Amino acid sequence: MEETQKWTENISAKHSLLDFKLKEIWDYRDLLVLMVRRNFVANYKQTILGPLWFFINPIITSLMFTVVFGGIAGIKTDGIPGILFYLSGLTLWNYFQDCLTGTSSVFRDNASIFGKVYFPRLIMPLSIVIGNLLKFLIQFILFLIFLFYYIFKGIHLQTNIYAILLPILLVLMAGIGLGLGMIISSMTTKYRDLSYLLSFGVSLLMYATPIIYPISMIYNKLPENFHWLAMINPISPIIEAFKYGFLGEGVLSWGGLLYSTLFAFFSIFFGIIIFNKVERSFMDTV
């Protein structure tokens, strides 16, 4: 009697758009770790300073902001030393920006790999988001160094219990960056113009986020009934909660964080749906 073959895995292009493939991602967790390592090594393999750029970039940017916006433009920082104020915003913003820009080119950057071997495609954007956590950790340590320096120097900074919200803020940043990145990545397989608009759009979004200015500056220019407009950018409540917890300045808005949470959830939800749809045929258009 002929034995019936039992396949351990069945690969098919026909699957639900709502299939998040969590089991497959867990089964391929070793590949996820390898991709995280590959992304880190590839970025700094042929650089002179290597990971030191994690420190150099935010320091130079913060110094430039201090001179241009704090010195020349005279934008106040609510009594927080300029470089510390800008670092507090850039630390989280850089993580979001890296997640967004990294995942937004997943299909284009990995077309050669996707066309040769099967694995859950969500491994790629997830590896970018997880890998960027290492960069965030290094820059967060840099921020803490400046924070403790000013505390020991006698600057009154009201660091409080809400600093423990940091893991939640990171998850929200990762969720928004991952979701929007997957949507953009899926659309750029057919509409290449979006990749050129992305860097411009990210720059505009940064200036619409309270990084180079305190949220109080916007509140002072708006009637009280319209203060919610300052938080219409879903990144703003996250940045402000971070500043409030570590610096004691800013606005901790639970309503704003709920809004950011819903935005992150729907970004990931629709991002995965569009990602799964494009995955089936992107090799014909990429």
Image (cartoon, rainbow, N blue to C red):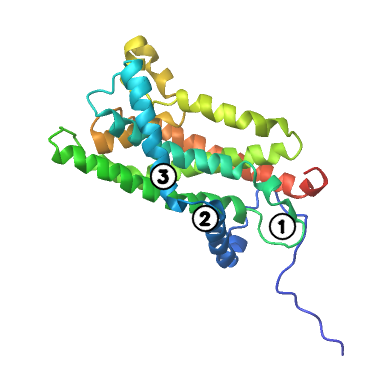
Along the polypeptide, which appears first: circle 3 or circle 1? 1
**Residue drawn 79% across the image and 47% down it:** 281
Q: Quadrant of residue 26?
A: bottom right
Residue 154 on image: x %, y %: 12, 35
Q: Is mark 3 on a helix, strand or loop?
A: helix
Identity of the amino acid at label 1? Ile
What residue sits right under mark 1 in the picture? 113
- Quadrant of the drawing holding the C terminus: top right
Q: Distance between the residues labelled 3 and 1?
A: 29 Å
Please give the label number shown on residue 61.
none
Residue 96 on image: x %, y %: 48, 39
What residue sits right under mark 2 in the picture? 40
Q: In which quarter of the image is residue 187?
A: top right
Q: Nearer the viewer, residue 138 or 201?
A: 138
Along the polypeptide, which appears first: circle 1 or circle 2? 2
Q: Distance between the residues labelled 2 and 3?
A: 19 Å
Identity of the amino acid at label 3? Leu
- Quadrant of the drawing holding the N terminus: bottom right
Q: How far apart are marks 1 and 2 (CA)?
A: 18 Å
Q: How crowded is mark 1: few (under 14 residues within 10 Å), some or many (20 or more)?
A: few
**Residue drawn 32% across the image and 45% down it:** 142
